Amino acid sequence: MKRIESLADEYITVFASPDPTHIYCFSPGIAVLPNGRLVATLDLGGPGMAQMGGPFGVSNRGKQVQGRVLVSDDRGRTWRQRLRFPFMHARPFFVEGALYVLGHCRDLMIVRSDDGGDTWSEPVRLTTGGDWHQAPCNVHMAGGHVYLAMERIYYHDVANWPVSLMAPVLMRGAVQNDLTDPANWTFATTLVARDAFSSAELDYFGVPFYTEHTGPKTSQANCAPIGWLETNVVQFTDPDHCWHDPTGRTFHLWMRAHTGGTGYAAIAKVVEQEDGSMTTMLETVPSGKTVVFVPCPGGQMKFHILYDEPTKLYWLLSSQATDSMTRIDKLPPDRFDLPNNERHRLQLHFSRNCIDWCFAGLVCMTRSAGQARHYASMAINGDDLLILSRSGDEHAKDAHNGNLITLHTVARFRELIY
């Protein structure tokens, strides 16, 4: 009998906090340029941000934040910083010779580089007067356009974590256009989580798992009202798939499901209309029933989905849960938040259809629940899968507020298929 061994426990440190108890590392994003250069993005936060030097943004929670761009020309062995930017939750993507980094600081913001990340434009606001959220999830290319999702917070009447108030917003931009121009983006209509599905009407499969708290968070054990967040974009090209659209105008949104439990993602879909507008709605199954929650290993935490054209498979990078049924008062002292919030094991799956997932391997893990490997992004680089993780070691404040951004490589990842 063979014991499962991690695929990529060893790592390269891309960024380390100079003050782990006061400056935290968040939001890793990664892109591979045509010339082989790797581009990494991240953001920093915490009570010690003033010592970092500007520029700073101010988040929707009134906290100072700052993003960074780093590049590597030796397959990730060494990294050089190329930019500090005043926003957060950003991701890099490359289209038509231009490298972009798009994120938010209340409003959506973007920067552009025309020399592969060495020099950058000034930040540009794509929206005005908004309250946005997201994490560095995937970027989808189709029909000469780039598609990605950000989330807008529409209501402010819940004092707890506002995932029930978020609406995933699919954005579309033509790749030949300057995507720092707000006029070159089209936004889908919005569907707020609590308007799409009511926790009071859900029964029989235990959602929400814990009693919801709408007031200010008084302890780590408070469960915010159910919702969705941290959206990936999926398109089904297999004509045998139940949700395949032969016109190519349907895009599915695969989201982290905040239910208090584990093992589900939340989904919706966006349909492009004849006039180019995009409409967001819930999906249905062949019986005609509406579906919001679908099976997804690690769907309770931020996950990342990539479609690999050579294998026609979707690859899922997510957090592995091992003890979500433990009573809250019996959790170890270094565990963060509710039992479903385990953050120290990254797992990899593949699927033909985004519903039936095959376990490919455990990417990496730590022995301590307080030393995280989570909130990761990934990119395909030839035969290898590059994974950029929001991580922590023994110096980290806790599992949520880590002190490292680490690069892990799953070599010849397609050999994991069976």
Image (cartoon, grey):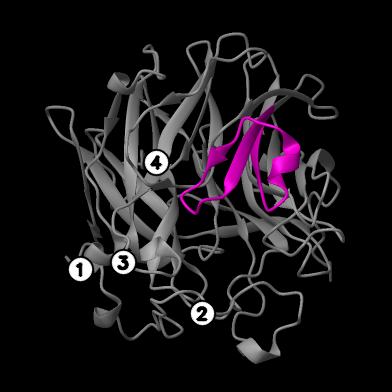
**How far is disc 3 from disc 1 in space, using C-alphas?**
30 Å
**Mark seen at residue 149:** 4
* Cβ atoms under marks 1 and 4 closer than 8 Å: no
Measuring from the top left, give residue 29's x and y in whole percent: 61, 38
Secondary structure type for disc 1: loop
Q: Is residue 29 visible?
A: no
Q: In the image, 335: left or right of 151?
A: right
Secondary structure type for disc 4: strand
The residue that disc 1 covers is: 289
Q: Nearer the viewer, mark 2 or mark 1?
A: 2
**Mark seen at residue 222:** 2
Bin the neighbour count of mark 2 within 10 Å (Cα to Cα): few under 14, some 14-19, many 20 and up: many
**First reached walking from the N terminus: tag 2 or tag 3:** 3
- Name the residue at 34% across, 24% down: 173
Q: Nearer the viewer, mark 4 or mark 3?
A: 3
Q: In the image, 397: left or right of 215?
A: right
Looking at numbered disc 3 in the image, what kind of residue is underneath it?
Asp
Q: Nearer the viewer, mark 2 or mark 3?
A: 3
- Magenta segment: 40-69
Q: Is residue 161 above or below residue 260?
A: above
- Name the residue at 57% across, 59% down: 358
Looking at numbered disc 1 in the image, what kind of residue is underneath it?
Lys
Q: Is residue 323 magenta?
A: no
**Mark seen at residue 193:** none
Q: Nearer the viewer, mark 1 or mark 4?
A: 4
The residue that disc 3 covers is: 157
Q: Residue furthest left?
A: 274
Bin the neighbour count of mark 1 within 10 Å (Cα to Cα): few under 14, some 14-19, many 20 and up: few
**How far is disc 4 from disc 3 in space, using C-alphas?**
24 Å
Q: Quadrant of residue 114?
A: top right
